[in-house]
Amino acid sequence: MYNSFPEINIKNYQEVLQGYESIIQKIKLEFKKASMNVITIECYPTTNEKELLENLIQPLKADYVIHADDFFFSATEITNQIQENLTEDRIFGVMSHQNMADFIDYEKYTEFFEKVMLNKEQDKKVVIYGVGASLLYDLDVVIYADLARWEVQNRYRSGVFSNWKADNYGEDSLRMVKRGYFFEWPVADRLKRALFDKVDYFLDMHQEGQPIMVDASSYQKALEQVVQQPFRLVPYFDPGVWGGTWMQKNLGIDQDKPNLAWGFDGVPEENSLYLKFGSARMEIPANNVVFSHPIPLLGQRVYGRFGAEFPIRFDFLDTVGGGNLSLQVHPLTGYAQEVFDSHYTQDESYYILEAEEDATIYLGLKNGTDKDELMTALSQAELGETSFPDEKYIYQRKVEKHDHYSIPAGTIHCGGSNAVVLEISATPNRFTFKLWDWGRLGLDGLPRPVHLDHGSANIIADRDANWVERELVNPFEIIAEGKKWVEERTGLHETEFIETRRHTFSGDVIHETHGSVNVLNLVEGEEAVVESLAGEFEPFVIHFGETFIIPEMIKEYRIKPYGKSIGKELKTIKAFVR
């Protein structure tokens, strides 16, 4: 019953336009308004601008069609300007603090501005389009063509799209994602946030040839509705060299893939949302909700700490019938700040959703391990001189369904085969230092990147088996209980900012948001229903394995068994910021 296409039915809206023909007619009406003779179409990077030009802009028959790319520095000049952000590494860069306006060629821009102003006086019709178009002119009608980051990443992989102003079609997709993560996306998001209140229409171009355009008022009301109710993101799944088959068999998704390693069902910075305006389903970046309504969504305290950024991440790791993940470590907070300019690091945990008889986790070092000796063995393995003897250095233990393991940054770890992990972590997902990958190539046929220098600087050597058993393994503590429910604190470690609570229940359970956005998953049972105590939102049904978000502004809510699960015992895991 897992829903791969969750929709949010929008109640109040004015106008939704489907298909190019209806959108063209609407823009023509805008041209007829007094003084409205410039249409600006701002595009998120990797928007299909060729499709936009041929199917929307050219049929408008404007007097001038201007591509924003022509007024920015060349691809070579921009790449040189951001080299410090890109670095030579295949995976890691340094976060950009630049603005898109920093890359405008102002000599060309001056000529353009005079040309546009002259055309306004002559009542000529002008269309400006592309990434950064709104920086050239944003006073008449502004349309924003938007994309979610997961769609952007798929376009990188296709070889048909390049990074913005890069001309790197077909480049190694990991390098393209790196350029996106450290430069392109933060720069584009800054512009989007600054532009948000100036946009007249939002344009969805996720599906080729099937655009949907919504007026800004309806769009803003839709986002406001989202933060007043429970909601789910649109999940996506991806195969990997160690991937398994449990999600395909049990969630009924992506049967055409060789396996599924990852399932991302709770990552607003990359996932999308489906907004249902009557018969039209509009796909938008979930991050837009965070940008536009951060305090109702996150809570004042969380917003004060993280800004308009969603700090909690849920995803699946499936190794049933697959292999071990890479042996890895995440950076300590100070290292992440100093080396990558990231505000915080990827502290995490593994909640075991399913485990076969031989499922294990690698967590911490064996007692008595010498770090220098460990790094020498890892270096020899990376050079291909020998296979890394993990059994000599890494603590390994059996895992069982519903175990929970905290993994604070600096702890060497690796998920073993034949398990399904619900990974609950802080949002920065880029900073994983692989130490050993069992001698494998990636699905792209290339060696998977290993970063021993970064890893060595962050492995905390005294996190050995004794420390792991004492600090990280199943720290279950009963917080409260009633007639038909028990609430347990399950972590995370005291060094991590995320708190997790597990509820085991066969009747009604009242939840509090604890001053933070809540992220939950139904980890046991077929289905449950989330209800408002005061009737502020409609009952929200969830199914096994589905991650869902409760905005902080809801404060209190009820979860109880539903449908086939009535009378049975269920479990949810909940995460929030301490």
Image (tube, helix red, strand yellow):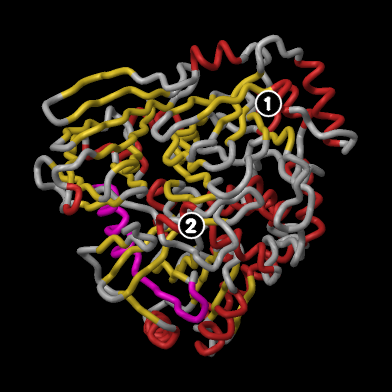
* Image x and y of residue 115, in percent: 63, 75
Q: Residue at x 56, y 25 (%)?
A: 397
Element type where label 1 sits in the image: helix
Please provide the residue range marked out in magenta. 207-228
Q: Is residue 211 magenta?
A: yes
Q: Is residue 460 magenta?
A: no
Residue 270 against residue 470 in the figure, above or below: below
In-front residue for pair 434/151: 434
Residue at the farthest left position = 534
Residue at the farthest front position = 357
- Circle 1: residue type: Glu
In-front residue for pair 38/391: 391
Quarter-of-image position of residue 74: bottom right
Residue mark closest to the camera, 2 vs 1: 2
Q: Which residue is mark 2?
A: 236
* Image x and y of residue 256, in percent: 54, 68
Q: Which residue is mark 1?
A: 338
Q: Residue at x 66, y 53 (%)?
A: 177
How far is disc 2 from disc 1 in space, using C-alphas?
32 Å
